[in-house]
Image (cartoon, rainbow, N blue to C red):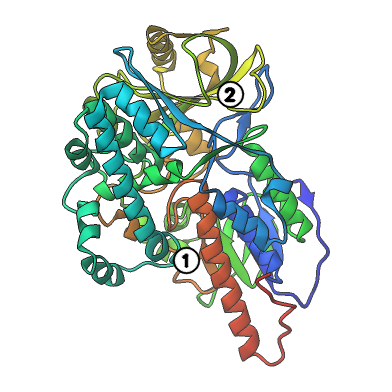
Amino acid sequence: MHVSTAPLVPDRPRAIVIGAGVAGLAAALRLARGGMQVTLLERHAHAGGKIRTLPSAAGPVDAGPTVLTLRHVFDELFAAAGAQLDDHVTLIPQGILARHFWPDGSRLDLHADAEASRAAIADFAGPQAADDFARFHARTATLFKAFDIPMMQAPAPRLGALVPYVLRQPRLIRAMAPLSTLNQSLARQFSDPRLAQLFGRYATYVGGAPHLSPAILSLIWQAEAAGVWVVKGGMHKLAEAMAKLAQKAGVEIRHRAHVDEIRVTGGRATGVTIGETTLEADAILYAGDPRALATGSMGAALKVVAPQTRSLPRSFSARVHSFAATPQGVDLTHHNVFFGADPDREFRDLAAGRLPPDPTLYLCAEDRGQTTAPPPLERFEMISNAPATETETPPKDLDQWHHQIMQKIADMGLAFTPTPPASTMTTPQHFASLFPQTLGALYGQTPHGLTAALRRPTAQTPIKGLWLAGGGTHPGAGVPMATLSARHAAEAILRAQTSTSMSAPTATPGGMSTG
């Protein structure tokens, strides 16, 4: 077990954070800055969770999230730690958000500047399509602004509070299209079906299908429209910076520390066991998929936590290639999307638990979009949506499916030298093994249904002293949302510690401060 040590301070309240993904790192940092003595436990040999890398001939290649959006979330986190984000990572803004390719040979770039996107769409599909986009952009901006504070920024949003909020704004109801799926709404908004296909794929950012997801998920576009940044060196550099900052704040990070049980005594979480070792704590934050607690895998007493995760459908997973090669053919940018010919069939197959024969492929050219020209041997991550699976048994179709995908890319004008082998792929079965009790799902429970966001677990649990954070917890999946969940949980823990200290005259607050 690798241990990053920090001195013990007996009079400071102790917190244990389980899981060193972005949520665990962000929460540990906030708790330490708030005056707590924090131990961060991670079962793997690295911090970052799903921000992970695999080796390649060109160096570490990302095998998880690829870019940073909603930068202000991280600016605020680093500022709360008395630091500046730009002093710890190099962020490169992207003028082109993504380049999109269709089987008919058409191509479209979307830009960080909305007017540039509108002009590109006019050239791509005509003035009517450009006007459609302008209206869509304005409508989703209204949605994002309206729901940022009462949903994403709220620790525990409630339907009873949201309904009156929405009813007071008829314009907001029209923008939400509450009786429509995302597919239905986009079909009405775009005269060109290729644009409906393009913006429908944003449902996959939270592991859903556009024909089953609520129309309100169109607001995800605004997270990208607000800016996309490439982290120089790869997204794992962000996780490394967060870990170093947490250690500087006094967080003890233990790698290869698999928690066997969260101990509950008298209805309160009191500590954790790692093999034959027991660690006690005043507060415990679980920063993994809450389904692991609901299934009782860390103790039968925890089954009361997030019980809905045992029965609600899981989000999609993915097959992810991570490799180094020299590309030939179509010009690439950092983000590239190669669409399938029939999106309806693609998502019907995924929803039914089948791999689509002609999937949309997302290709991240990790060395593009930098301040320098890409090297001869570049790093790539290629993602295809796949159903989550309950089994950890390796699939039998990998070689055949891999050949099929490489042929699809070749048919769309792109080849790689050397051709990456199937062994460069991470499958849903691998994800299920890496992250136990997730069933291989990458985004927690499914986003399907109008009230899906309100069914996610929040930071507070029925067990005193135990809180939740992460992509499976409110406000949802994705690096920025998981980081927001960490803020919600850390603030709740610090409030609880302050309340306990104030109600117990003999307790020592330990310099509690939100920093």
Secondary structure under tag 2 reads loop
Towards the viewer: 400 or 241? 241
Question: Considering only vertical position in the picture, is 391 above or below 358?
Answer: below
Q: Determine the image quadrant of residue 428.
A: top left
Tag 2 residue = 368
Tag 1 residue = 301
Residue at left 44%, top 33%? Answer: 111
Q: Amino acid at mark 1?
A: Ala
Towards the viewer: 370 or 74? 370
In the image, 338: left or right of 369? left
In the image, 45: left or right of 266? right
In the image, 368: left or right of 120? right
Location of residue 510 in the rendering, given as x and y in whole percent from the top left corner: 74, 78
Location of residue 30 in the rendering, given as x and y in whole percent from the top left corner: 64, 63
Towards the viewer: 498 or 174? 174
In this orientation, does residue 474 appear?
A: yes
Secondary structure under tag 1 reads helix
Q: Determine the image quadrant of residue 441.
A: top left
Total count of labels = 2
Residue at left 37%, top 26%? Answer: 120
Residue at left 21%, top 67%? Answer: 167
Pair 1/2: label in front: 2
Towards the viewer: 435 or 350? 350
Question: Considering only vertical position in the picture, is 114 above or below 254?
Answer: above
Location of residue 90 in the rendering, given as x and y in whole percent from the top left corner: 68, 39
In this orientation, does residue 313 appear?
A: no
Residue at left 54%, top 71%? Answer: 492
